[in-house]
Amino acid sequence: MMRTVRELLLVFLVVLAVSPVPAAAPDGQKVVDGLAEVLRDMRDVTADVEIHTRNRQASGSIVLQYVRTPGEGPDDPERTVRKYIVVTRVRTRDGLAAIKQVNDGRYLWVERSIAATGEVKVIRRRVSTEGPVPGGFGPDWRKEADVWRRKFDFTTLRDDTFDEEPVTVVEGTRKEPGRDEDAEKHPGLSLPDRMVLFVSRRDRFPRKVELFSKKAEAEANGVLTVSVRLMHVKLNKGLAPDTFDYTVPPGAEFVDVK
């Protein structure tokens, strides 16, 4: 009997020794560094998107591309041009509206159409290479990832699965809560107090972003103000040359902002 117990114990110890040890979840800061690296090297991405705010929900799609082009002189030998198409559908008091933004590298076209009335309005403005760095998850993801790395401390919450995608969930908290220099320079811009990122372990691209802001000291963890879900992500698959070509629809009201 004692021999049997010793043999069973020996077998248990051998199995324990050769069994793989579960890998620890990666450090949160390293996860965001990896995300920033992917965005820096990214050529193009397409995805479906769902956006939830405190008082509005929208769904749609996004196409984003970074293109290197010659600069305008010896002091500007090369620049990166950002092109994108963002289509969102949102319910307004006039009914369901579709808003399409097309940035072709020279102009930003904003098309707003109301399904119930057939009304279509298009606004065109020259694209500026300067301006505020968004604090949310908008089209210029490279700049935003840089802001996140500079202004937030990240820790890993857990490894998980989101939309059947293996992800690492990390939490970012503001290094200097309160006053926001970027917001002071650019009225209307404000960084969240806390964010939660669901970052794919497969391609290191985010699948969900949650932004929290504090409106009172009693709100220790902040209130969820923006949630962005990215689905059917296709990274660096290549885009057709005419992807960002835009033509004003016949009969649309056109406004050219100088």
Image (cartoon, rainbow, N blue to C red):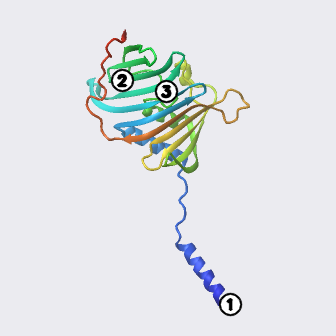
- Neighbourhood count class around disc 1 (C-alpha, 10 Å): few under 14, some 14–19, many 20 upward: few
Which amino acid type corresponds to the residue marked 1 in the rendered image?
Answer: Met
In the image, what residue occupies the spot 54% across and 16% down?
Answer: 93
Task: Report whether residue 64 is seen.
Answer: yes
Which mark sits nearer the N-terminus, 3 or 2?
2
In the image, what residue occupies the spot 40% across and 13% down?
Answer: 121
- The secondary element bearing badge 1 is classed as loop
Which amino acid type corresponds to the residue marked 3 in the rendered image?
Answer: Pro
Please name the residue that numbered disc 3 is placed on.
134
> Can you tell which mark lies on residue 103?
2
In the image, what residue occupies the spot 42% across and 47% down?
Answer: 203
Between residues 182 and 55, which one lies in front from this camera angle? 55
- The secondary element bearing badge 3 is classed as loop
In the image, what residue occupies the spot 37% across and 37% down?
Answer: 45
> Can you tell which mark lies on residue 176?
none
Instruction: Name the side, left or right, on which 17 lies relative to 235.
Output: right
